[in-house]
Amino acid sequence: MEFNSFSFMLFFPITVGIYFVLPRKLRCIGLLAASYFFYMSWNAWYAILIGVSTMSSYFGAILIEKKQQSRKLFLILTILLNLIILFFFKYGNFVLNQITNGLYLITGKEYVWYLDVLLPIGISFYTFQVIGYLIDVYRGEIDAEKNILRYALFVSFFPQLVAGPIERSGNLLRQLREIEKINLWELKRIASGAILMVYGFFVKMVIADRIAKLVNTVYGDYAMYGAVELIVATAGFAIQIYCDFFSYSMIALGAARILGFHLMENFNAPFFADSTKDLWRRWHISLGSWFRDYVYIPLGGSRKGKVRKGGNLMITFLLSGLWHGANWTYVVWGGLQGFYQVVSDLTGNMKKKLTEKIGIRTNVFSWKLLKIVITFALFSFSLIFFRSETVGDAFRVIKRLFVRFDPWILFDGGLYEIGLNRTEMGILFFALIVLLLVDLVRYRKGMMIDAFLMSQNYWFGCFVVIVLLLATFVYGVYGPEFEAQQFIYFQF
Amino acid sequence: MEQVKRRQLIRKYIVRAGLFFASFLICFLFIVRTLRFKNTDGVYMMKTFYEQEPDTVDLLILGTSHAFENINPGVLWEEQGVASYILGGPNQRLWNTYYSLKEALKTQKPKLVLLEGYAVCFEGDYVTDGQIVSNTFGMQWSRNKKEAMEITIPKKRMGEFAPEYIRYHSRYTDLSSEDFLKDKGDPYYENWKGFFCNFNTMYYDTQDVSQISDRRELNEKNRVFYEKILQLCSDEQIPILIVISPYPNASPEDMMAFNTAEELAERYGAAFLNCVREPDRFPIDYSVESADAEHLNYKGNQRFTKQLSVYLSENYSLPDRRGEAGYYSWQKNAECLNAMIKNQELKEKVDKEKVLEGIGNSDYWIFASTDGDCSTADPNIAEYLEMLGIEEKGESGIWLRTDSDNEAVLVGTDAYSKYYRYDKTDFKASRSLEKDGLYRCELMADGMIYHPIANGLTLLFYDTVTESIAGCVGIDGDQGYRIVNWYDYAPEE
């Protein structure tokens, strides 16, 4: 059941309605039932996997807490068990593929080995959430949860189950422990959640799914397109993946807020970042902070010298790339992110001296804008790997950027023949302006759209929400004429 | 005090929430009204049917496009004063006809149901998406509509048609004035009775199938609902007449299906009139009276409907509603149809008689312009000028005769430009000096330029009944004052 589906439009209000009238003691079990229903709507067998993950980590955490002497062992075992499950379902076929490729190179014989398994939706997210919890218990940052139902809800909480944010026990579990005390009938909080959801649907259905048509057209047949189309499609993919993921996070945050919970933010105007380091403070924050706290810092972080720091960064980002999918393209993408950070680190002083020598003013808008543009360009470039089917494809796309330069398509109407016609481009343009303005407010004032609108006059807030709702209704990509896109991060 | 403040706060929130939802609902309903389908064939038919006064429709005509293109309610009204309404749909299957009939009987109690029975020929249990929309989306939500949709749409595809806005929300690229204006901005739809008058003419080779007496099996689903229609009429004690109207490409297979349908009708005591079997009694000249392979054009439908109305008067006692209160819309509908037909005749092959007839039509605005070296002194155009009441001697310019004037008024000479408006139609009448030192007019209506000749008299006819251009001719001085029809050379719209 996707967020942008008719079933969810029915499921969510019914769930909220029931939840709001349930006795306080039954709230936890009510939400748990709803969460499992939500998850099983994809495939009922998934419940077994998440159940295994839940039970193993539940008991694992209790043992970690109780058995002080063998706590490290229990930590490792429980993490390993969950990683094995994740590895089996997510990377099993990838590994088999590499083995068969290697055998073919050695022996010349073709082998066809594959596992007939479906990747359970959200497994990467809840596995990491569970591992984070185990480590938090190990570190003494939180007590092991004794209430199995509450813990199961922490793992399976439906707004953030399938595509994050990857919640921390210190945030979500703590709130769940107070579930009976939450005053549900707080109208401002409900309105705030509703605004976030409305905006999330707008971004997903009007922007992300619309721009996907252009991206899919060009990347689906990249050998037919020149540099300009590929640049437009690559930048478009950057916007698509941001809007897609950001919208999911907005809907998740909004839904959780209506239910009385505050999830962590996952994006903070990332395309206003002025460096790749800054970008990763703003992009997929829950994953970035997870890797920082549970991989980078335990590896030593920046405490062991520049070389070690560089190595730690590379490992962290390579793993982060691998987390995204079982394909070398994701690994290369992750590696590029690490590379950017390492190079940025190493050249920091040199850049400063150079700008001083040339006399470039760095505390002005133009310089900031240049850095923002360069950061966006670097990030978009790396997404060529993320979007391509294979590393070879990605290199072929990059090659075409240089060998087939075709600027005339910007003037001869060719831009309207790569998936979106003039009308659709116009709609996209105006929708992107809305996105830009909302992100600008976030960047400059630190306010999300709900807070901003609620700080304005009521009529203005009403007007904006009504316009967003109607725009989604009219211009949203849904219905039999369109191919509504699944959320991209569902595949991870 | 606390309680008072709390109550005030709650009241404030309720008012705000109420304002929000009310504003949203108003905007949403406007958008739905604008975007939803308004197909003339199907959706709009049902919509205007609901607008008919209850218990006013005496003859309910059902069926496919054979019904709403071959049977002319304007002619039925003029011939016999029959108040009829056509509730059909494109390629409408009999299951949709059944539910349309059920829907119609909620508000009407017709004296006769006429089922145009071409649909008995159809095979297949499901139709195209466009036909699903046309045949179901016009109905108001009810159990009847739910059943109609369930029988029309494959179960696994129901989500693609309900809720309906899934289908039409993206029509923003197709919007036109029809979506915003009442009655589609066309006076014909103000008193519409479900008829689409086809003005095309296409010669179609026919074969004589009148002697075929064999039968064939009907599609099972079709047959079931055909019998349900017959049964429903029987239960409601409404006589039903199944008519097969003449059409060019009637095939032997079609006839075999009609024969089977006739046999079934007999079992229910229903009358069956197969006009294809009786070409002598219902003659049609397919060389000039067919619009395409399936339908009659404006000449054909008039002729056929006259023949049909004779049959109806001989076999049924349908009341003559002419002059009765509550039936004014049928009169207006007939007048509008007549005006449309007259306009079409003026657009087709025109001769002097037609032009003079047009000038004599008081429903027309007429722009008259002498172009090039032509003036009112020219004896070759004197007859036209006299009919227009133009008295100026030796004058060259643009005259306008509106429907309230008997005489055309000289509105401009030499270089001239002025705008006029009739209801929603904008005109621009201008004259300019050309390179040869002579003045010529340019008549523009709703963005289209009418300029048939370089020297002579130009006449632009605008029909105030249909609010459309009725015709444009030039009496061409360069071609011996031959009548030139602008529509013979007009660019395609």
Image: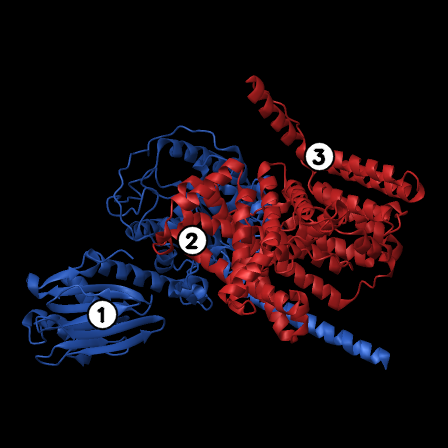
Chain colours: A red, B blue
User: What chain letter is assigned to the residue under label 1?
Assistant: B
Residue holding disc 1: B443
Residue holding disc 3: A87
Tell me the kind of residue under disc 1: Leu
Tell me the kind of residue under disc 2: Asn
The x, y position of residue A469, in whole percent, is 59, 62
Q: For marks 3 and 1, give the CA distance.
A: 77 Å
Quadrant of the image containing the N terminus of chain B: bottom right
User: What chain letter is assigned to the residue under label 2?
Assistant: A
Dots 3 and 1 on the same chain: no
Q: Is residue B383 left or right of residue B466?
A: left
Among numbered discs 2 and 3, the one appearing first in the sequence: 3
Residue holding disc 2: A421
Question: Few, some or many C-alpha atoms within 10 Å of disc 3 (few <14, some 14-19, many ≥20)?
Answer: some
Q: Nearer the viewer, mark 1 or mark 2?
A: 2
User: Which secondary structure lies at badge 1?
Assistant: strand
Q: Is residue B252 above or below residue B271?
A: above
On the image, which quarter does residue B258 sit in? Answer: top left
